[in-house]
Amino acid sequence: VSNLGDDDVAIALDAVQGSAGIGRVVETGARAVGLADKRVLVGPIDPCGECEVCRRGGAAVCPSARRRTAWPARVTAAARWAIVLGDGLDANAPEGAAIAGDVAIAYTLYARTGAAPREPVVVVGATPVTRFLVEILAAKGLTFAVHVDAAPNAWTAWLATKGAVAAPGAAELEAHFAGMGLARRPWRVIATSADSVPVAAGLAGPRATLTVLAPIASLPGELATREVTVITVAGAHPDLVVEAAAMCVKGEIDLANGTAREASADHRAIVELR
Ligand SMILES: [Zn+2]
């Protein structure tokens, strides 16, 4: 006997990555029969889509959202938030599992930061999300640099292949942007992990914006003395998954290499196979 809601689907997962998965619809509620047997992407939450928080673009923090914290082989999801694959928007398992996960988180960091062309963007961090964010910023034609530890390594080599400028400190970043005619323009600093927040906060100068990804421990109070605007991101916004998927289809995001299991460097997303 099924306990699916009328608007729900049951998905047999092929793979999961972090808080997202890819799989096939194996059972549908009465109003979701159109999704029967479809391959879908599924993210961590089903927002209500109708409350005042959702209406203001806050679906990721909807107080009425259903949240999936465990990832058994079969999950229940709201049909309206399952991203149907096929018809030009396709993805393979296992790497497709990352689309509604780390790729969508990276896309949300980009979208929430809202940088305009020729606004200096500084990325701090070296995680799977960082990697996808770099590819998104490059594809969007934004002016950005990545803060890195001084020693060249596999990560800085990869950044170079993406045309991303890697700089070890504030002085180098300032020189880079000044060389582009962007001296003194307030930066948009994005911290992609909790442990990158202290460095990112230090780089956020007067009137900068600082985008941080939950969870973080704290923010320095001295940000207020520079009138830094803090933008917080709780997780992937469900309504941005389609755009993230489209970038993967176009090859703007290298999903296969970004999720490669054999690559053990910590900036690669690892997908669990079912
Ligand atoms: Zn809501």
Image (cartoon, helix red, strand yellow):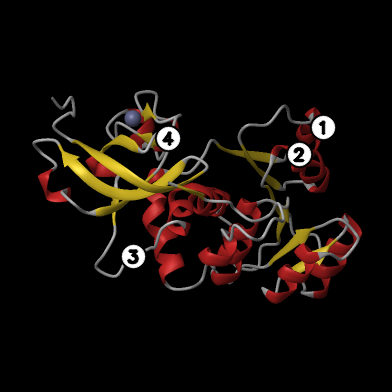
> Can you identify the residue that label 1 sits on?
222
Check disc 2: other Cα within 10 Å, few if <14, some if 14-19, many if 20+: some
In this image, 175 relative to 257: left or right? right
Q: Position of residue 106 (x, y in %)?
A: 55, 52
> Can you identify the residue that label 4 sits on?
71
The amino acid marked with disc number 1 is Glu
Check disc 4: other Cα within 10 Å, few if <14, some if 14-19, many if 20+: some
Going 55% across and 71% down the picture, which residue do you hit?
A: 139
Q: Are marks 3 and 4 in contact (CB under 8 Å)?
A: no
> Can you identify the residue that label 2 sits on?
195
Q: Are marks 3 and 1 in contact (CB under 8 Å)?
A: no
Above or below — where is 80 with respect to 121?
above
> Can you identify the residue that label 3 sits on?
90
Above or below — where is 16 with respect to 94?
above
**In front of the other: 144 or 86:** 86
Check disc 3: other Cα within 10 Å, few if <14, some if 14-19, many if 20+: some
The amino acid marked with disc number 4 is Trp
2 or 4: mark nearer the eye: 4
Going 74% across and 73% down the picture, which residue do you hit?
A: 160
Q: Is mark 4 within 8 Å of ligand 1?
A: no
Q: Earlier in the sequence, mark 2 or mark 1?
A: 2
Q: Is mark 3 within 8 Å of ligand 1?
A: no
Going 56% across and 58% down the picture, which residue do you hit?
A: 259
Q: Earlier in the sequence, mark 3 or mark 1?
A: 3
In this image, 136 relative to 80: left or right? right
- Give the distance between the C-alpha atoms of the residues marked 3 and 4, in whole angstroms: 22 Å
Q: Position of residue 113 (x, y in %)?
A: 58, 50
The amino acid marked with disc number 2 is Asp
3 or 1: mark nearer the eye: 3
